[in-house]
Amino acid sequence: MKTLLLLRHAKSSWKQPELHDHDRPLNKRGKKEALKVGAYLKDHDLVPDLILSSTARRAHDTAQTVAEESGFSGQVDLYQDLYLSDASCYLDILSCLPEDANRVLVVGHNPDLEELLTLLTDVTEHLPTATLAQVDLPITSWQEFNEAIDGRLQLLWIPREE
């Protein structure tokens, strides 16, 4: 069994309208949310073996903060294809992961994450910023990962509701 943790990036700032969308940083609330997600992962024994993130600044900053706060000891892997893509890009990337990664965290964007969640679980949920979804996958190898998989949504956690 593999576990996929889907995390929508935390709340970003719109204070600098001249910035390209890709370069928008987290705002104050977003920074707090990312810290809460990291603490949640640590407190609930959900620290991932691998963290993947979109290259967008708000996603990368979320991933870095979550990694540090959770005690994750690895490096956050950045993927340009996780920015402004679709669920099929996520599927392609995840199907090539190393076998020793049993729990993987992906930090990305909507609507891609919502589409992926529905594709994997047949559950449709809105994912506000910093929402964490835990999907258990009935596979032993990431090479088995595809859109026909019958994943199970185990958890949907929204830090601002805490």
Image (cartoon, rainbow, N blue to C red):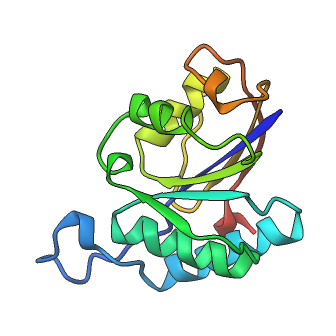
Residue 123 in sight in this render: no
Q: Nearer the viewer, residue 82 or 58?
A: 82
Residue furthest to the left: 18
Q: Is residue 37 left or right of residue 152?
A: left
- Rendered-image quadrant of the N terminus: top right
The answer to whether 30 is drawn above or below residue 78 in the figure is below
Residue name at image x 75 percent, y 69 percent: 162
Residue name at image x 58 percent, y 79 percent: 65
Figure quadrant of residue 135: top right
Residue 45 in sight in this render: yes
Task: State the image coordinates of residue 144 (x, y, percent, origin top left).
Answer: 65, 21
Q: Nearer the viewer, residue 157 or 113?
A: 113
Q: Is residue 107 left or right of residue 44?
A: left
Q: Nearer the viewer, residue 60 or 24?
A: 60
Task: State the image coordinates of residue 133 (x, y, percent, origin top left).
Answer: 68, 47
Task: State the image coordinates of residue 149 (x, y, percent, origin top left).
Answer: 66, 18
Task: State the image coordinates of residue 91 (x, y, percent, origin top left).
Answer: 49, 31
Q: Is residue 47 left or right of residue 68?
A: right
